[in-house]
Amino acid sequence: MSLSTPISVQKLQTALHAKAKGSPDLRFYTVYDKMNRTDVLAFAYDCCRANRGAAGVDDQAFDDIEAYGRERWLGELTEAYRTVHQHVRHRLRQWLCAKHQMQGQGSERFTDRYLHDVLGLVCLPKRTANFPWAKA
């Protein structure tokens, strides 16, 4: 089965290719946020499905995912990225406060902008969905 790449994914691939060829020494810290896009995840899912991929470490097969609901599963996957990102920022601030012997949360001194622009923390896009399982 041959899949055609969606236009939005083609544009992303073209932009990343041009940037990589134009700046071979550039490190792509923010590429991880691109894999969180719904269109990229849906296309990757379709490619794996067409390739008859086996169940992963979570032992979920494609039939299980489709019975659960493909769009629902992909939506929860994108929400998981946001939850992980929030946790990483929180733990990084805790570590920075301990390192610099500071009291408090550290959110005033170590803003999101500082974590991303200065320290190079990858910024994942925000999602508005609210999934109860992500509140653990």
Image (cartoon, grey):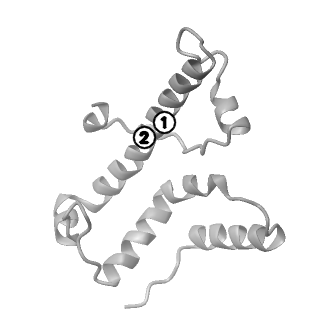
Left or right: 15 as drawn, with respect to 31: right
Furthest toward the bottom, the residue is 1
Secondary structure at badge 2 equals: helix
Q: Quadrant of residue 69?
A: bottom left
Give residue 53's position: percent from left, percent from top. 29, 79
Circle 2: is it few (<14), some (14-19), or many (20+) Cα within 10 Å? few
Pick the residue in front: 116 or 6: 116
The residue that appears at 26% across and 34% down in the rendered structure is: 132
Distance in Å between CA atoms under marks 2 and 1: 6 Å
> In the picture, which quadrant includes the C terminus?
top left
| Quadrant housing residue 130 | top left
Q: Are marks 2 and 1 in contact (CB under 8 Å)?
A: yes
In this rendering, is residue 129 above or below 74? above
Crowding around mark 1 (Cα neighbors within 10 Å: few <14, some 14 to 19, many 20+) is few
**Camera-side residue: 7 or 132?**
132
Please state which amino acid type lies under the numbered disc 1.
Answer: Val
